[in-house]
Image (cartoon, rainbow, N blue to C red):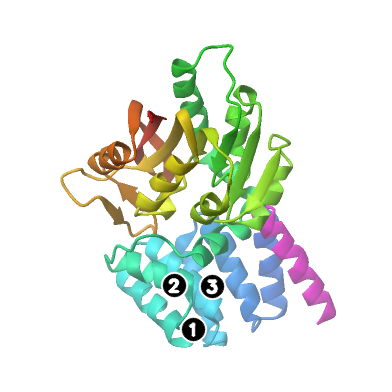
Amino acid sequence: MEEISEQFQIANKYLVEGKLEEAEELFSRIIKAQPDFSDAHNKLGIVLKDCGKLEEAIRFHERAVFLKPDFVEAHYKLSIALRDASRLDDAVASCKRVLELDPENSPAIHMLSALTGNTTGRAPADYVTHLFDNFSKRFDCHSEGNGYRVPLILRELLNKHVDKEFFFENAIDLGCGTGISGSAIASITKRLSGVDLSENMIQEARGKGVYEKLYVDSVEKFLENDTEQYDLFMCTDVFVYIGDLTPVFNLVRERALTNSIFAFSVEDVDSAGPDYVLRKSGRYAQSALYIQSLATANTFKIIDKQTEILREDKGKTIQGSLYILQYEN
């Protein structure tokens, strides 16, 4: 048993570090040696899902909950794999099973809302931290593999609107993650800080060496409690976890210097529909009319907007818009 436990720890380390082939091989060996090890079945399901082997992932998650019927995490991971396999009714059933076992489970509450078309105002903080805390060490490689270029494109848009010799005096990277956005804008800032909900992502960002200060907090709570003023707000791939952007826009306005720049990305939704929607992916999308109304209400002028393919998700391209706003008070 001690040897199996040590192997499990090593395999889990491989998973956290994104060494999926090594993790798959070692978890498989552990299961062969101990077929009733429910945790190993669940972890192998996670690895297989990350490798795009959805049907295999589902089988191992199902085996995990068969072996341990009250295994909350395995039920939740099963619901995500079922969703990605377009087995939505089964995904809903798995989410409901999670909530029978753990009625306050924030990730399952959020995903059940997404799967059943119930658009909420924002994703729970626990959902976001759950999503990223165990993903931090492989986030950069994953983003690169999915063609994620939003920070670089926003930097290119910024270059169109600032002089070559211009530097932002005090910039804040809202939802900085591992620091991909900060790295894109660091060379045009004199002082750059970052904030993110995930402590593990902040640790990865610290290793980039581009931030003067880093904070573990939500975007809204940070801006509510902060006393500094900024001339650049960067916010990439963050509004996919916040549907109702009214509080964020209000708080950015309060912390903005005259002529400050607010650069951000959103996933697009048809402007003929609601202001924002919660998609089955668990991510939010906002309409152009909604962004325009928020900008106008908060004395921001949209000085640039560009529609782009933001990333790839399970072989499909996700379209969104990149905005550059300027505060005109």
Contact, mark 2 vs mark 3 (Cβ under 8 Å): no
Q: Residue at x 26, y 65 (%)?
A: 117
Residue type for callout 3:
Phe
Contact, mark 1 vs mark 2 (Cβ under 8 Å): yes
Residue 148 seen: no
Residue 49 position within the rendered picture, expressed as x and y whole percent measured from the top left: 51, 60
Q: Is residue 18 magenta?
A: yes
Contact, mark 3 vs mark 1 (Cβ under 8 Å): no
Q: Residue furthest left?
A: 272
User: As displayed, is residue 262 above or below residue 21?
Assistant: above
Residue located beneath label 1 in the image: 102
**On the rendered image, what quadrant is the N terminus found in?**
bottom right
Label 1 – label 2 distance at C-alpha: 9 Å
In this picture, residue 128 sits left or right of residue 276: right
Task: Please report the bounds of the magenta region as a residue range.
Answer: 1-20
Q: What's the mark number on residue 60?
A: 3
Residue 190 position within the rendered picture, expressed as x and y whole percent measured from the top left: 66, 26
Q: Nearer the viewer, mark 3 or mark 1?
A: 1
Residue located beneath label 2 in the image: 108
Tag 3: Cα neighbours inside 10 Å, few (<14), some, or many (≥20)?
A: many
Q: Residue furthest top?
A: 164
Tag 1: Cα neighbours inside 10 Å, few (<14), some, or many (≥20)?
A: few
Label 2 – label 3 distance at C-alpha: 19 Å
